[in-house]
Image (tube, rainbow, N blue to C red):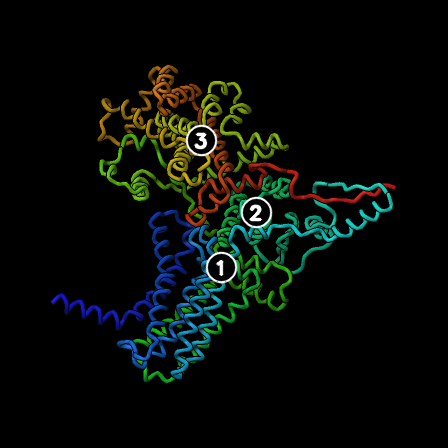
Amino acid sequence: MGKKIMETVKHLWETWDIRILMLTSLFIQSLLAFLAPLRKRTSSGIFGSLMWLLYLSADAVALFTIGLISSSQDDKPKIGIGHNQELLVFWAPFLLLHLGGPDTITALSLEDNQLWHRHSLQLVTQVVVTIYVFSVSIRRRNGLWVPIVLIFVDGCIKYVERTCALYSACTEVIRDSLREPVPPNYDKMVNEYHSADNAHIPSNFEVKYGPSEGSTWSNHRRDHVASDQDESTVNGDDSLSRFRWNTVKDTDELIGYAYFFYQKSKGLLADAFLSLRDDGEIREYFLSKPAEEAFRILEIELNLIYDVLHTKVFLTYRRRGCLRVVSFLSVTVSLLLFSLKDKSNYKRVDVGITFALLVGAILLDIAAIIMLIRSDWWIVMVSQQGMPKILKSVCLQTLTWSRWMRNTSRVRWSQSISCYNLLKYSFRPPTLLFDFIFIKQIKDFFVNWLYVQTLPVDQRTLKFIINELQEKANLATDREAIEDVCSARGNLVLQDDYFLVSEYLLPWTVDVDYDESLLIWHLATDMCYWMTSEDERNMMHCKLCKELSDYMSYLLLRQQTLLSPLVGKSDVRFEHTVEDIRAKTSKSKDRKQSVETLSVQFSDEVLTSTVDGKSALIAKAKDSQSVYHEACRLAKQLNMFGDKQWEIMSKVWVELLSYAAIHSSARSHLAQLSKGAELITFVWLFMVHLGFREPLQPSRGLRSTKLIVHK
């Protein structure tokens, strides 16, 4: 009985395997095309896992299926195929098309871009396999050879596009594209120097830092004063103050600014150096804008960066859109030719699958065109000079007609922050089953599920952060002041704005490691928060402190790849602190009460008790990394300032956030864009535009050399 069932299953699989896999491949491509754009708008781990599965399955299914088709090309037709052998050959180039993938995703993570050479090799091998399948069928007088060739051309275009997108987003390629060309007058200058030297005329080179005459930057500024631009176009390399959009709305102007900033900060994509002198205008622009507009531009700029690193969309901007016309016409003509062909010798199910593949390819191309028109890159493309007038006119008219499809307030990131609270973990310990989970990724998944809470970002929080950074940038006018801001983690605001109280609070900012300082302030903030009334908790500064405290705790303990330079002993400190809190509350607390009630009781007990420095010294002598005693002392100090404590803490938390942002690598920030983005990434980019970055080398970048001949 069992043997008979197995034979039946085997027969069904041999009959339907290629058919099922072809439809599965098409289904996966459709899901990727429409779900991939959601990656930048959601931080869900489950959705990320789904995208990971689809991304890996897409290539695996296509490669496996094309292998089955090639192996079926022998003298003995495959079971259930018969006269449909021609359709099998017709299906082969569709798999090449599927390997090219949709426009909305080329790389799942930044690391995939570094594997462009692997995709290049895979492109060559799959093209060879497809040609082999086609050549075998030609000997059998395949009547579908014209549609096969057309789909093969379409598949090659899509696959080459994907490989080019990966190559263009590779770190080394981006870094190479940033190299400045040799000045055109270099050879002339050297010849003049040798001539003067041979004539015994004293001469020397004078190096000047700043934009040189004749440089790109200098030419842009001169052009802006000399003439205006026609139509509604804006040169992406122009000065900020002279952007002109005569036929577009304000939101298109913001996209123009965002693209300008992306061009000037492109080195961030490859961890390359950015000169401080290069972005004076950008800095002044962001200092003059309200917080809402500044943050909106950051959203658009990060969205452009995401498209460059993870999609094909920006390839069209690079004037490769003509290939899309060829691609779309190829599949359309193939559908027309197949519709006109006599299909009486083919099985109806195979004919249906073929139509599904053709129509699916056309619909995916149409969807890609609509997404391009609705994207920010369409406005960028229309704004470029050098485009033929007829094509520019068509693009502008398309932009006008597509206004109803464009959402001027579209969501470009998750607009949320994740919170991880030490007291919650202490009062609701994980079950004993956690001790039997040895795979870290699985344990992390359950910890995030149980203890990490996702909250929408309060607009007041964003505005406060941006205003604080703008205020610091206004005061930081020289290199030393900028370095002070970059190295500040609570101490600067205490010394400048609250000098009288700084001596009481500074020991927990500059005298300890960053990870220890953050955990101390996190626990102290919680204690102070739970001692306030319900009305006070809804106050802006109080709510902001709670949000940033839990958010920074999440980054330090649950997003350690992002803050890898600052993690230190945070895990050990966290565990030791949790043990101290549980030991302190083991006898006096009813575990059935809510976390909020337990937190209030714990905070009241700590702040009403006597705390001295001896207990902290004893803990250190025992080699404990707990921050419990230090946090209790800090909380008591803060509580002495009454309502003023929340204003002080809010500014300290902004400095702790900005310190972490600027001391994390650019690549770690950019890696978050495909996971819904993080608030700290926006803070990092904003600080970079304001001139805050590590390390600072202001003399690099704008430099010119002049030959001085003394008479």
Badge 2 amino acid: Gly
Q: Residue 552: which numbered mark, if any?
A: none
Quadrant of the image occupied by residue 364: bottom left
331 sits to left or right of 578: right
250 sits to left or right of 15: right
Q: Position of residue 127 (x, y in %)?
A: 44, 69
Quadrant into which the C terminus falls: top right
Residue for point 71% across, 53% down: 223
Quadrant of the image occupied by residue 203: top right
Q: Nearer the viewer, mark 3 or mark 1?
A: 1
Badge 1 amino acid: Lys
Name above or below for residue 464 compared with residue 667.
above
User: Marks 3 and 1, how far apart in space?
Assistant: 43 Å
Name above or below for residue 596 compared with residue 370.
above
Outermost residue, left side: 1
Q: Position of residue 422 (x, y in %)?
A: 34, 31
Outermost residue, right side: 711
Quadrant into which the N terminus falls: bottom left
Residue for point 42% across, 27% down: 516
Q: Earlier in the sequence, mark 1 or mark 2?
A: 2
Q: Earlier in the sequence, mark 3 or mark 1?
A: 1
Residue pointed to by mark 2: 267
Residue pointed to by mark 1: 312
